[in-house]
Amino acid sequence: MALLEIRNLHAAVEGEEILRGIDLTLDTGEVHAIMGPNGSGKSTLAKVIAGDAGYEVTQGEVLVDGVDILELEPEERARAGVFMGFQYPVEIPGVSNTYFLKAAANAIRKHRGEPEVDAMQFLKHVRERMELVQMDESLLKRPVNEGFSGGEKKRNEIFHMAVLEPRLAILDETDSGLDIDALRTVAHGVNSLRSDERGFLLITHYQRLLNYIVPDKVHVMVQGRIVKSGDKQLAVELEESGYALFEEGAAA
Amino acid sequence: MSASNETIERLTRRGYEYGFVTDIEQEYAPAGLNEDIVRFISAKKEEPEWMLEWRLEAYRGWLEMSHPNWQKVRVPPIDFQAISYYAAPKKRPGSLDEVDPKLLETYEKLGIPMHEREALAGVERPAGERPDVAVDAVFDSVSVGTTYQGKLMEQGIIFCSMSEAVRDHPELVKKYLGTVVPRKDNFFAALNSAVFSDGSFVYIPKGVKCPMELSTYFRINAGHTGQFERTLIIAEEGASVSYLEGCTAPMRDENQLHAAVVELVALDDAEIKYSTVQNWYPGDENGVGGILNFVTKRGLCAGKRSKISWTQVETGSAITWKYPSCVLKGDDSVGEFYSVAVTRNRQQADTGTKMIHMGKNTKSTIVAKGISAGEADQTYRGLVRVNPTASGARNYSQCDSMLIGDKCGAHTFPYIDIQHPSAQVEHEATTSKISDEQMFYCTQRGIGAEEAVSLIVNGFCKDVFRTLPMEFAVEAQKLLEVTLEDSVG
Ligand SMILES: Nc1ncnc2c1ncn2[C@@H]1O[C@H](COP(=O)(O)OP(=O)(O)O)[C@@H](O)[C@H]1O
Ligand SMILES: [Mg+2]
């Protein structure tokens, strides 16, 4: 059974159809990349999978481990192992990063019938994960994303993922706006979490991330549809030819 | 309406936890207010003549005053002749361990920590087990017991009910009562001065740091009554004390009046920290019933380098009208006001503070956080006055409002009156909402919608909660969670 199976997914926002029939199958252990021009619906796809109530699914199914998740609340999807790294991470003033993560970890554990995390053990776990993404320790105590630089916010998303250890991680343009060192760190974080138990959907605008995280598959998304899928070579071709070719195809 | 708004709306309508009534035999003053009632109350408390005269003078003053109408709240007409001004459990304990078990049970239901209840029942724990908190429990018009009095007395600290203080420490009461809030200060202060029932009296002698938190739990139980407690705290030179009050009342469909007066006096280098967790019954979701909370609280920094801090967490009452204030008379004295006020359903609050700078180099800080949900309306009203004598005065004010839903309101009225050119006064104000993005971010991480709301609101209140004593910060945080979380179905 696939980890993620999307069948003929259509979604609209404010009555306008954005996703116009997406099909995608991702197995555990795999990393898929979704590439496409701005406005093609990549973030919409990520948010629809994660359960953002601002988007209306008009048709289709999204199965995680064989279960249709479209009727579930976002927190229920998260507890079932779906994680989304936000393109624009949100600030939660006054709530420390560690406290926030502990609340999240405990909510997930409670759902699994496990006891609350031990405070000391959790701190140890958090420290280890912090090193993985080379995040500054001070960001643990600071309020979630408040006053973080663009790069710090992106790193923080990877850090959250590393702490929560999801089954399916959807990372929405975690690479954009990062300098090359930060990009390497983020890639290192993702690569060290790759495992047979986990799958990744990387949404990216640029091919360069894929030099560091080698995907099993690449999908090209244009105007709400996946217009072409292939192996990592496809990303390289895209880099040379651009999206224009596909845009015409999609419009036809 | 978006899905997260719906969740928030549902979460902010919930039941009241402390709405039960204790079935206990009580005696009452007949309803109504006149000189005989004032005499009746004074006689019940076996007060000396001077105290009765003081009350009568206040009563006569009150007759000439009228209900204030400048506040931004709609107050239902109050029939002062329909209220009983005195209610007390019939069986009066001779000592702590004679306290009626039903009363102890009441305090248990209110969640007053175990060791305090034991202490109320006279069981003292070995020292050092956990930080002790001395408690005075006021039930309607009387104090039913005060803990740790003996232990505190060893250091000369007086912690007792106001009635006891009038009896046992008349010289102190005479010297300070009404000096910070004069009898005719305002309509409700005058009423309180005439009919005041129990409250706490605290005296910390020169140089003594009070070794434990002092607290009073106020409980309104009887129907058709009001509560008019009076509290007086005096910190002598170099003394310090941290005091906390908590308040609850049963659910009733009548409005009940609570008109308290609190006076604080800090002499040279003294420090008083006064924290309130106010959770009076707020009325139901249609605005029926609830406590009308008209309170005058004022602290006088009489001495040099003295400091008074007010922290309040206000979640209850149908109407809240209160402005804990500081008169900064001593040079280099410091006043602080930290407030979290939550209004939901049809609750209304007009609250804030006054900082009156009189001494040189006096400093004040105001941090007010208002959270409004449902159809509630909230106003911050604050005055910063720098008198011509107050050279080098400084004030920093920050007022933040959070609106939950789109039917509630938040208003800010900062009055600034500067009469000295060297004053530095800063005022910041913000208004925010819990955004759909914040809700989605939290829930995407696995945090349930209810927990997300309380997490975000708690974060918003962080600057105030960190000023509460540790144990009470946890209590306040929980109260806020309950206030905002319990759904009605
Ligand atoms: N909340 C929204 N409200 C209105 N339009 C939206 C919203 N979210 C996305 N869109 C529109 O949907 C299209 C796809 O957006 P998005 O999914 O963010 O694309 P991408 O992530 O590929 O850049 C764009 O035209 C965008 O303007
Ligand atoms: Mg995007």
Image (tube, helix red, strand yellow):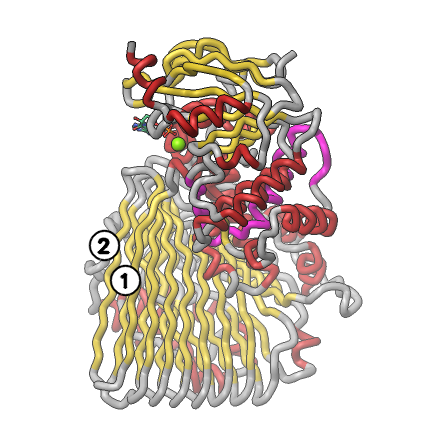
Residue at 31 percent of width and 78 percent of height: B356
Secondary structure under the numbered disc 2 in the rendered image: loop
Q: Is residue B304 above or below residue B424?
A: below
Q: Give yes or no for residue A93 being in the magenta stretch.
A: yes
Q: Is residue B222 visible?
A: no
Q: Chain of mark 2?
A: B
Q: Residues within 10 Å of mark 2 (few under 14, many from 20)?
A: some
Q: Pick whichever, B280 or B462, lies toward us.
A: B462
Q: Is residue B242 left or right of residue B71?
A: right
Q: Which residue is mark 1?
A: B381
What x and y, as percent, mark residue B307?
A: 46, 80
Q: Which residue is mark 2?
A: B72
Judged from the image, the quadrant occupied by ligand 2 is top left
Residue at 34 percent of width and 88 percent of height: B359
Q: Residues within 10 Å of mark 1 (few under 14, many from 20)?
A: many
Q: Is residue B128 left or right of residue A26?
A: right
In the rendered structure, find residue B432 and report the number of the disc placed on it.
none
Secondary structure under the numbered disc 1 in the rendered image: strand
Residue at 52 percent of width and 54 percent of height: B476
Specify the segment rendered in magenta.
A88-116
User: What's under tag 2, amino acid-wise?
Assistant: Lys
Q: Pick whichever, B365 or B270, lies toward us.
A: B365
Quote the CA–CA distance across marks 1 and 2.
9 Å
Disc 1 residue: CB within 8 Å of ligand 1: no
Q: Is residue B2 left or right of residue B154?
A: left
Q: Is residue B41 left or right of residue A69?
A: left
**Contact, mark 1 vs mark 2 (Cβ under 8 Å):** yes
